[in-house]
Image (tube, grey):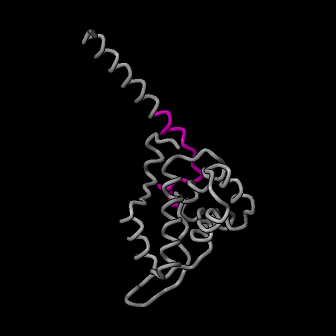
Amino acid sequence: MINEDIFNTYLSSLDAILSEESELKRRTVRSVLDQNDADSWDDAVKHYDAIRQDITDIERICVNISEARRVVNRVKDHVFFREHTFIVDDIAVKRRFDADPEIVNAWSRLTEGDHVSSDLELFKHEQVESILERRKGLDYVQAHTETVKLGFNWNPEEAYDGDSG
């Protein structure tokens, strides 16, 4: 029979260790840009241009997340190159996605191999969204909504809560 006091002490110690580990991971998730810094939103545009020019990221991401080249290429095309249909005041407008510091951070971590699970969630979200847009002919909002309904969510804040990939 286990001594309850010893067991509770053990659980408290374990909880403290896990909390410290979680805080350490949260602090050590690598970021290129800070989404809370207004200048980072401008800098994200430059990073998107650099990502568009990068011819090595696809192969590196393939290796880092064990994904087929065609899939990684599809996601990169969807996020950084393709124009998407947005409905604005009942008028269809085609444009690329706005540059986002959190996507810069996630793409960088996927490329470098220090990704966290929320980066993989972003990747899968964009993969499904791209399929829905192209195969079903959905506009961006419809494809995004359907992707979320299918359970492919992305929450970049999870990257900074100690979650690891």
Q: Residue at x 72, y 67 (%)?
A: 53
Of the 4 image quadrants, the one containing the N terminus is top left
- The percent position of residue 21, horizontal first and vertical second, equals 47, 30
- The percent position of residue 87, horizontal first and vertical second, equals 42, 84
- The percent position of residue 56, horizontal first and vertical second, equals 74, 58
Q: Nearer the viewer, residue 53 or 73?
A: 73
Q: Is residue 140 above or below residue 27?
A: below
Q: Residue at x 66, y 48 (%)?
A: 112
Query: Going by the picture, which residue comes out furthest to the bottom?
Result: 91
- Magenta range is 23-38
Q: Quadrant of residue 44?
A: bottom right
Q: Quadrant of residue 51?
A: bottom right
- The percent position of residue 68, horizontal first and vertical second, equals 65, 59
Q: Nearer the viewer, residue 59 or 87?
A: 59
Q: Is residue 158 above or below residue 143?
A: above
Q: Residue at x 54, y 80 (%)?
A: 95
Q: Residue at x 50, y 58 (%)?
A: 122
For residue 57: magenta? no
Q: How many marks?
A: 0
Query: Going by the picture, which residue comes out furthest to the right?
Result: 55
**Horizontally, is 133 left or right of 5 in the view?**
right
